[in-house]
Image (cartoon, rainbow, N blue to C red):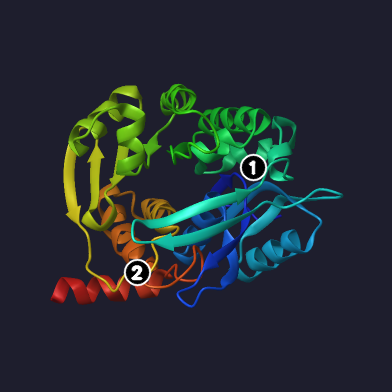
Amino acid sequence: MNTPQILCLGEPLVEFNQTPEGPFAMGFGGDVSNVAISAARHGVQTGLITRVGDDPFGAALCDLWASEGLVTDHAARAQGEETGVYFVTHDASGHHFTYRRKGSAASRLTPQDLPMNALQTCPIFYASGISLAVSSSMQDAVIEAAQRARAGGGIFAFDPNLRVALWPLEVARETTHRCMQICDVALPGLEDARQLTGLHDAKDIASFYHELGPRIVALTLGAEGVLISVEGTQRVLSGHRVDAKDATGAGDCFNGAFLATLLATNDPFSAAEHANMAAALSTTGYGAVTPIPNLSQTRKALEIAQRA
């Protein structure tokens, strides 16, 4: 059995993304799956804790993970159950999501499905607010997995990744704040964090999350870049100007690249610089997965940017 350096828990999804010509192109998504693929493309052995249906969509996801070299020992195929799907539409205000995931195979994941031995030896365990919101049993599994990973000396990385379509804002706020109390690396997006904290200024938000518990806060600012804060030392990295087409999954790309680089360098500021470029590159194509760059592509783009 392969030993992943990063384990991600959540719900993978099949994506149907509206193209400029009008039709929907099939792809793949689900935030934790995106993060896992990003981390793997940036050089780290990464695995998933999840369940998919025994339908064609579940099979397609398994084929994708195999092609990306992910560890799937803990990604179960559930007989008679269905894989969740979602649709992405675009207009002048941005991209919008419509989900068909209720009762999915992943939503039935429980703490009994957790690979306790793998969690105890894994350097990083990752989950998100979506993982918490999908179902109460998955929420219990996230908390149990985070505690088990930390007890084994690993760190818990968490993105609150707010989806008010999945749960009310007040419930999301209370639950994600509680999760932040056992979190080591916080990876919030600015707009989500503004809703969850009631604060507006990025530096105030980073300080707020530090007070809850995380040592590292990487607050993504969309096209404006990222604020990286380590135990109160804050630095803003400007966004890279690219020919952006679709921001779907850019935050997930950032998270995977950040965690992979953090493992490689143990330098949060270097990890943020690397992930900031990776996220920018991921917006230059359509869909959540296909445009995610690999390690060499990100490094080359950084070298070009630094010479400019």
Estimate how packed mark 2 is, as few (under 14), some (14 to 19) or many (20 or more) residues with alpha carbons within 10 Å.
Answer: many
Q: 219 or 74, which lies in front? A: 219
Label total for image:
2
- The residue identified by callout 1 is 118
Question: Residue 173: percent from the left, percent from the top?
Answer: 42, 26
What residue is shown at x 61% (from left), y 61% (from top)? 70
Cα separation, mark 1 vs mark 2, equals: 32 Å
Question: In terms of depth relative to the viewer, which is nearer, 223 or 70?
Answer: 223
Does residue 80 lie above or below 277 as drawn? above
Amino acid type, label 1? Ala
Residue 162 as seen in the image, left or right of residue 216: right
> 52 or 306: nearer the eye?
52
**Number of the label disc, if any, that sits on residue 183:** none
Mark found first going from the N terminus, 1 or 2: 1
Among the 4 quarters of the image, the one containing residue 275? bottom left
Decide: is 238 above or below 302: above
Residue at the (64%, 42%) spot, across then down: 118
Residue 230 in picture, x, y percent from top left: 25, 38
Mark linked to residue 281:
2
| Quadrant of the snapshot with the C terminus | bottom left
